């Protein structure tokens, strides 16, 4: 079942790069930017993360919390965060529970080969825990403008 605007965002608990458990419910009362990306340290994912980093204060001032999710492990996330000085947590969804709950673990096709992977997607979740926006066509270099303009 695909998630839609206005529906309750699936609750989850995941581990961040430091092994701390983070739950969606702990951010109730804030607007959450929950962004799913395919892989740490790849060109598109780096551009997206750096765009959010460069606009982080702007996002915070508008009441947003930023959470990134990929299937990479905590160690990979730590290196990615340190390399690009990312100020927000990245959740290690190695068992695919969060990506599957949000419907972004999909069949992909590259160079004629099909494989399972994460569809780059951002969910904006409102203060009550409902999905207020879903961005499927992510502009990695101008992602903040997409979010704020949503």
Image (cartoon, rainbow, N blue to C red):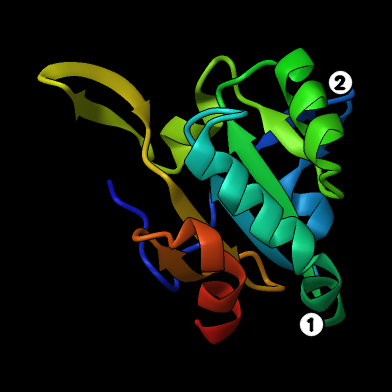
Relative to 91, say whether 51 is above or below: below
Q: Residues within 10 Å of mark 2 (few under 14, many from 20)?
A: few
What's the mark number on residue 139?
none
- Mark 1: secondary structure: loop
Reply above or below: 46 against 92.
below
Specify the label residue 19 is tagged with: 2
Between the C-alphas of marks 2 and 1, the distance is 28 Å
Residue 140, given in percent of the width and then of the height, sits at 50, 56
Q: Please report whichever mark, 2 or 1, sits nearer to the chain's N-terminal start.
A: 2
Residue 91 picture quarter: top right
Q: Nearer the viewer, residue 108 or 6?
A: 108
Q: Which residue is mark 1?
A: 62
Please tell me which residue is depicted at 75% across the width and 52% down the height of the picture: 25
Name the image quarter holding residue 100. top left
| Residue situated in front as seen by the camera: 72 or 50 | 50
The percent position of residue 120, horizontal first and vertical second, equals 42, 45
| Residue found 71% across the figure and 49% down from its top | 67
């Amino acid at each position: 079942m695909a998630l839609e605007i206005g529906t309750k965002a699936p609750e989850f608990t995941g581990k961040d790069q430091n092994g701390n458990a983070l739950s969606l419910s702990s951010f109730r009362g804030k607007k959450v930017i929950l962004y799913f990306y395919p892989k740490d340290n790849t060109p598109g994912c780096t551009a997206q993360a750096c765009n959010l980093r460069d606009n982080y204060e702007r996002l915070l001032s508008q009441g947003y919390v930023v959470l990134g999710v990929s299937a990479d492990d905590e160690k990979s996330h730590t290196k990615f965060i340190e390399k690009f000085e990312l100020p927000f947590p990245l959740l290690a969804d190695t068992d695919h529970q969060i990506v599957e709950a949000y419907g972004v673990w999909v069949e992909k096709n590259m160079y004629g080969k099909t494989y399972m992977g994460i569809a780059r997607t951002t969910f904006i979740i409102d203060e009550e825990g409902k999905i207020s926006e879903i961005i499927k066509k992510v502009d990695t270099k101008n992602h903040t403008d997409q979010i704020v303009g949503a």
